Amino acid sequence: MTETNINSVVENLMILQPLLYKNFLKPERNKTTLSPGTLFVLGVLKRNVVLSMSEIGNKLSMPKPHVTGLVDKLIAEGYVERLNDPNDRRIINIKITEKGIEDLVAIKKEISKNLRKKLLTLDEEKLETLSRATQQVKEIMILLLNEDDHDCCKSTIK
């Protein structure tokens, strides 16, 4: 691949996140007290149920002090709870609560609903092109990352 192609891919990937955030996530963020970081923590806990602070940090590539601050906010809101590890009292595990699961699912559904509305404005050909392109980008990105690095990107609605 030429340097020009690599630069083009880099530019395209870097513009996707701000576009998605501005058009689909930011409007919903105004309806909740949860930050993107706390949503990522809830998402990884929903998939894994119980994790230590270090495991959360590893799965989200966040430093432990940052995870601790996010978890403290989630505890204050009743979205997660601390549990002592039965095998090692030095380890504190974090578990998502029913309220955390319910609110996360509701937020994701609202984001999906708004995204669907925008997608319905596309003609069938453009929608098919976008479907293939996003599938290909996802598959290629997963190849670039190892299993733990893309854990935060898996769907949290089952």
Image (cartoon, grey):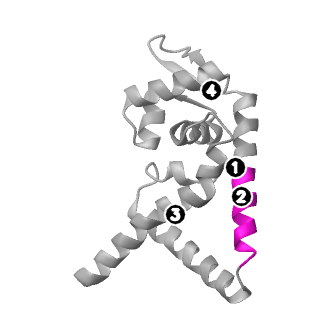
Q: Which residue is mark 1?
A: 108
In three-dimensional space, the C-alpha distance between marks 2 and 3, rounded to whole angstroms, equals: 15 Å
- Please name which of the two marks, 2 or 3, marks the residue nearer to the observer: 3
Q: Is residue 116 magenta?
A: yes
Dot 1 lies on which element? helix
Residue drawn 57% across the image and 73% down it:
135
* Mark 2 vs 1: CB contact within 8 A: yes
Q: Label 1: how many residues lie within 10 Å, few (<14), some (14-19) or many (20+)?
A: some
Q: Which residue is mark 4?
A: 95
The one nearer the camera, 20 or 82, is 20
Q: Tell me the amino acid under the disc marked 3.
A: Leu
Q: Earlier in the sequence, mark 4 or mark 3?
A: 3
Residue drawn 62% across the image and 44% down it:
29
Above/below status of 33 relative to 84: below
Dot 4 lies on which element? strand
Q: Earlier in the sequence, mark 2 or mark 3?
A: 3
The one nearer the camera, 153 or 118, is 118
Q: Tell me the amino acid under the disc marked 2.
A: Ser
Q: Which residue is mark 3?
A: 19
Read off the magenta span.
109-121
In three-dimensional space, the C-alpha distance between marks 2 and 4, rounded to whole angstroms, equals: 25 Å
Q: Position of residue 131 (x, y in %)?
A: 63, 77
Q: Is residue 144 magenta?
A: no
